[in-house]
Image (cartoon, rainbow, N blue to C red):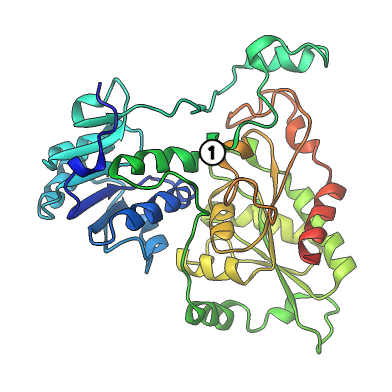
Amino acid sequence: MTNSSPAATFPSHRILVRGVNWLGDAVMTTPAMQRLREALPEAHITLLTPQKLSDLWQAHPSLNAVLTFSSGESPWSVAGRLRAGHFQTALVLPNSPRSALEVWLARVPQRIGSAHSWRNWFLTHPVAARLDHERMHKRSVSEINRLVSAPVNDVRGPLRTPRHAPRATHHIHSYLHLAAALGANPDPLAPRLEISAAEMQQVEGAFLRDARDKVPGSAPGKPLILLGLNPGAEYGPAKRWPAASFAAVAREVSRRMGNCLWVAFGGNSDWELCNEVARLAGGGVLNLAGKTSLRQLMALLKLCRVVLTNDTGPMHVAAALGTPVVVPFGSTSPELTGPGLPGDARHQLLRSETPCSPCFRRVCPIDFRCMTGIREERVTAALRASLAR
């Protein structure tokens, strides 16, 4: 197997970057894209991304062009279109066999990506994982039961995950490691997205013109405090802090601060969940789940003072736009997929001292203690501290 070769051996005129498939993961690739542009300022860099994510990259300074593919499009169809680009080098960011197959079928001469036995044949330069790379280990039900039933001082060997893993384990570093094969600096940068003032003005006019009517007892002369709520998580219910808890925090912060407008975000499938949060909060919540485009979502997240969110795509988007986030973490690990640059003090990442967390499961097989153990009072205090800054 070949590890990354010196960057000088790769043609750098026309580079294709095969992007990742999920919103949060895409945001975590932006530091690698920025470093790649720094290393190769004269190169023509094209990103291949799922159609649903194309707007994320609008006006991004790291790219010259964006190509998209639909969810039902075959690798052969994608590759046929890629051949017209006459790319000399492909940097494959996902770990999937399909992503490597696409650039092989496209006959890109140099193909760089993470080394895995089931796809190395499609790559000319498989890149070995970093020595400090940490995979997300999905715990079995038997492991979870062992951990929660063990005495507090019984660490039971490797089943316990360190509460503070080294910062280099974050997924940002994995993408930077791949970009380094093309000469990019692997030192981390904060994820970065672009949104214009005109776009923010547009969403204010489209969604917030009559927003004051949603705020009970608002003082007409006092500006609204715009806050975000993102109670959904596409991965599964194990990542979702309870809807009643979201509502309780919104209600308490509004009571203490006054003039708070909460905007609930999500996709079409999150509308009922966000509506439930709005109902339980007793007013002051504008449910925009399923009503915004990706660019409109970005503009609204940029306008928010703070966003209370689960570990999901909009969390990463908000942080990359400079908006502080407060995040209850349960089944996932902030050391691996936390928002922004690891250690950024603007973001409040909360977790309970539950021995089975992170388990990386979609559904909790026991009693959801990792999330219910994060008390509403603690989240309220974290959110108010963010506002005080």
Q: State the residue in front, 22 or 169.
A: 169
| Location of the C terminus (image quadrant) | bottom right
> For mark 1, what is the residue?
170
Q: Can residue 4 be seen in this view?
A: yes
Closer to us: 111 or 140: 111
Q: Look at the image and tell me in which quarter the N terminus lies.
A: top left
Tell me: residue 5, above or below residue 263.
Answer: above
Q: Residue at x 64, y 33 (%)?
A: 331
Amino acid marked by disc 1:
His
| Location of residue 374 in the rendering, given as x and y in whole percent from the top left corner | 80, 40
Where residue 184 appears, as percent x and y from the top left, is: 35, 47
**What residue do we see at 23% from left, 58% from top?**
43
Nearer to the camera, 247 or 2: 2
Classify mark 1: helix, strand or loop: loop
Q: Which of 126 and 371 is in front in this view?
A: 126
Q: Does 9 sit left or right of 352 as displayed?
A: left
Looking at the image, residue 289 sits to the left or right of residue 284; the answer is left
Query: With respect to residue 332, does 41 lie above or below?
Result: below
**In screen coordinates, is 249 left or right of 322?**
right
Decide if residue 123 is in sight here. no
Hey, which quadrant is residue 235 in on the image? top right
Question: Can you say whether 119 is above or below 311 in the image?
Answer: above
Q: How many labels does the image show?
A: 1
* Quadrant housing residue 176: top left
| Position above or below: 114 against 88 | above
